[in-house]
Amino acid sequence: MSELRDRMIRDMTVRGFAPRTHKAYIAAVVRLAKHYRRLRS
């Protein structure tokens, strides 16, 4: 995993987010990254 992803998961854990929320937020960030990569190409 990337350092940024590890930090995001760690921060969500500290704040008490549910595991399902972790998955949803990570998926949203992945979709955002894919979107911006497409715009640059």
Image: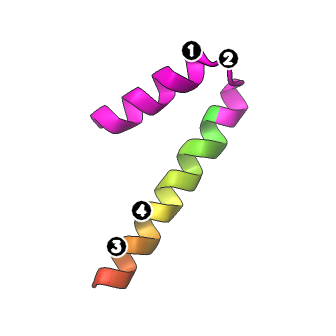
Residue type (three-letter) at the residue carrying disc 3: Arg
Q: Secondary structure at mark 3?
A: helix
C-alpha distance separating marks 2 and 4: 25 Å
Answer whether labels 1 and 2 touch (C-beta < 8 Å): yes
Q: Position of residue 35 (x, y in %)?
A: 46, 73
Q: Which mark is residue 33?
A: 4
Nearer the viewer's eye, disc 1 or disc 3?
1
Nearer the viewer's eye, disc 2 or disc 3?
2
For residue 17, above or below residue 4: above
Q: Secondary structure at mark 2?
A: loop
- Indicate the quadrant where residue 23 lies: top right
Q: Secondary structure at mark 4?
A: helix
Q: In the displayed structure, does residue 24 sit left or right of residue 41?
A: right
Answer whether labels 2 and 4 touch (C-beta < 8 Å): no
Q: In the displayed structure, does residue 17 sit left or right of residue 35?
A: right
Q: In the displayed structure, does residue 4 sit left or right of residue 22?
A: left
Residue type (three-letter) at the residue carrying disc 2: Gly
For residue 18, above or below residue 26: above
Q: Which mark is residue 14?
A: 1
C-alpha distance separating marks 2 and 3: 31 Å
The residues colored magenta run 2-21
Q: Residue at x 50, y 53 (%)?
A: 29
**Residue 12 among magenta residues:** yes
Q: Which residue is mark 2?
A: 16
Q: Residue at x 62, y 19 (%)?
A: 15
